[in-house]
């Protein structure tokens, strides 16, 4: 085996006890490889797990790499040469009881992911001209750019000037579906490192206020760094562990709970997770998700909106959570979405974003409005 295959084989072996993407990052940091070699290692590792259902883990890894390359070549040449039964090898058996499995979704899972950028509002055309190798989105997604080039974008002056973020198109859609307005107050309750917080700030023209919270202080510190680069100022950060003790007594025009989930919607980008996620994980996460929504609902002001989002597609974490919350949310009712969303599937205040539709992650959203109660 060459140096690329040897390192890829080591990463795959270590991924039996840790997430492959984390193992990969650590291995590439310590390896003395060219940029092209690092990209080849990452591509081989992710291809291995993308085609894992076709492989025999007890087989010699070098032979399995040959098999992976054959499958990659066949698929890139014509996905239609794979039958639906063959494509079902791309997912564990339990998934068919949880997801409306379609051939289109299975093909999307086996397709290499797109690198999406989010330009500052109204600047995508100028940014595309600077970076090159970009295709601009259409409709409400004109700030989105598909990057097809080979530059290290983290080293570009445009990135350091805060002119764009690397953000999946489905994540951008979530912010657009929330539709925050300048001057409003919003709470990004599970903000992580702040991708949607920064998008909110841009959509709000840095006016109004956004509270961003997470249980991880490390993620919130990273959010502050990203916000400084993006020149986003209309936000505050506060830790929140998901309990009934909220980080502020303020009431909000909108609350977004982008909850922790099984991540099935990211399986195109993170194929290793297909083989480590279990139905037990899904059930446990659904209980956490429901509690997060019910606890965060107390922060919505009369006339405000409550939005639940997850980057997964399991029934247990999507419709089932939305149904349970609808029964328990006092004073809330399913709320309509902006008119431009009519083509997205979903009913009763719910929307589905499938990977095959926008060539990004899969996501589910539910939205409720808090009714003004009579005194």
Image (cartoon, helix red, strand yellow):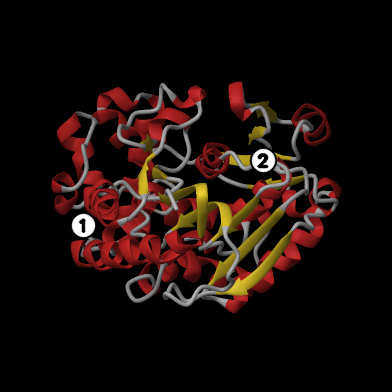
Q: Position of residue 289 (x, y in %)?
A: 34, 62
Mark 1 or mark 2, which has the lower sequence index? 1
| Residue at the image position 42 percent from the left and 32 percent from the top | 336
| Residue at the image position 32 percent from the left and 55 percent from the top | 329
- Reading the image, the residue beneath label 1 is 56
Q: Is residue 134 left or right of residue 156?
A: left
| Residue at the image position 65 percent from the left and 48 percent from the top | 200
Q: In the rendered view, would you say 50 is above or below 135?
A: below
Q: Position of residue 312 (x, y in %)?
A: 35, 50
Q: In the rendered view, would you say 282 is above or below 107?
A: below
The quarter of the picture where the N terminus appears is: bottom left
- Reading the image, the residue beneath label 2 is 181
Q: Nearer the viewer, residue 86 or 102?
A: 102
Residue 286's label in the rendered image is none
Name the secondary structure under disc 2: loop
Q: Nearer the viewer, residue 275 or 265?
A: 265
In space, the residues marked 1 and 2 are separated at their CA atoms by: 53 Å
Name the secondary structure under disc 1: loop
Q: Position of residue 201 (x, y in %)?
A: 71, 49
Q: In the rendered view, would you say 337 is above or below 313?
A: above
Q: Quadrant of residue 175?
A: top right
Q: In the rendered view, would you say 339 is above or below 143?
A: above
Q: Quadrant of residue 154?
A: bottom right
Q: Is residue 37 visible?
A: no
Badge 1 local density, few (<14 within 10 Å), some, or many (20+)? Answer: few
Badge 2 local density, few (<14 within 10 Å), some, or many (20+)? Answer: some
Q: Position of residue 362 (x, y in %)?
A: 40, 42
Mark nearest the camera among 1 and 2 is 2
């Amino acid at each position: 085996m060459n140096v690329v295959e040897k390192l890829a084989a080591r990463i795959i072996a270590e991924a039996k006890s840790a997430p492959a993407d984390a193992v990969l990052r650590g291995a590439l940091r310590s390896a003395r490889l060219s940029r092209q070699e690092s990209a080849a290692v990452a591509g081989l590792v992710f291809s291995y797990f993308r085609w894992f259902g076709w492989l025999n883990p007890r087989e010699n890894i070098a032979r399995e790499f040959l098999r992976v390359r054959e499958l990659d070549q066949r698929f890139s040449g014509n996905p239609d040469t794979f039958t639906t039964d063959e494509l079902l090898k791309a997912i564990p058996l339990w998934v068919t009881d949880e997801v409306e499995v379609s051939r289109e979704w299975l093909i999307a899972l086996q397709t290499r992911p797109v690198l999406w950028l989010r330009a500052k509002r109204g600047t995508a055309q100028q940014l595309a001209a600077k970076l090159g190798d970009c295709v601009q989105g259409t409709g409400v997604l004109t700030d989105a750019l598909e990057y097809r080039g080979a530059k290290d974008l983290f080293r570009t002056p445009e990135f350091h000037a805060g002119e764009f973020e690397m953000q999946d198109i489905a994540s951008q859609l979530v912010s657009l579906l929330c539709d925050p307005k300048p001057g409003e107050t919003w709470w990004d309750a599970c903000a992580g490192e702040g991708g949607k917080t920064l998008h909110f700030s841009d959509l709000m023209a840095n006016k109004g206020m956004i509270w961003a919270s997470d249980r991880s202080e490390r993620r919130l510190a990273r959010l502050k760094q990203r916000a400084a680069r993006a020149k986003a100022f209309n936000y505050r950060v506060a830790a929140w562990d998901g309990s009934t003790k909220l980080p502020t007594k303020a009431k909000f025009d909108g609350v977004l709970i982008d909850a922790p989930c099984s991540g099935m919607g990211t399986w195109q980008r993170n194929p290793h997770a297909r083989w480590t996620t279990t139905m037990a994980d899904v059930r446990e996460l659904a209980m956490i998700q429901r509690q997060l929504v019910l606890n965060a609902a107390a922060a919505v002001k009369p006339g405000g909106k409550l939005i639940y989002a997850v980057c997964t597609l399991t029934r247990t974490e999507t419709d089932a959570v939305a149904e349970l919350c609808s029964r328990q949310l006092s004073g809330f009712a399913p709320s309509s979405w902006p008119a431009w969303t009519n083509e997205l599937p979903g009913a009763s205040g719910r929307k589905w974003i499938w990977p095959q539709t926008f060539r990004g992650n899969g996501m589910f959203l539910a939205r409720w409005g808090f009714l003004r109660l009579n005194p």
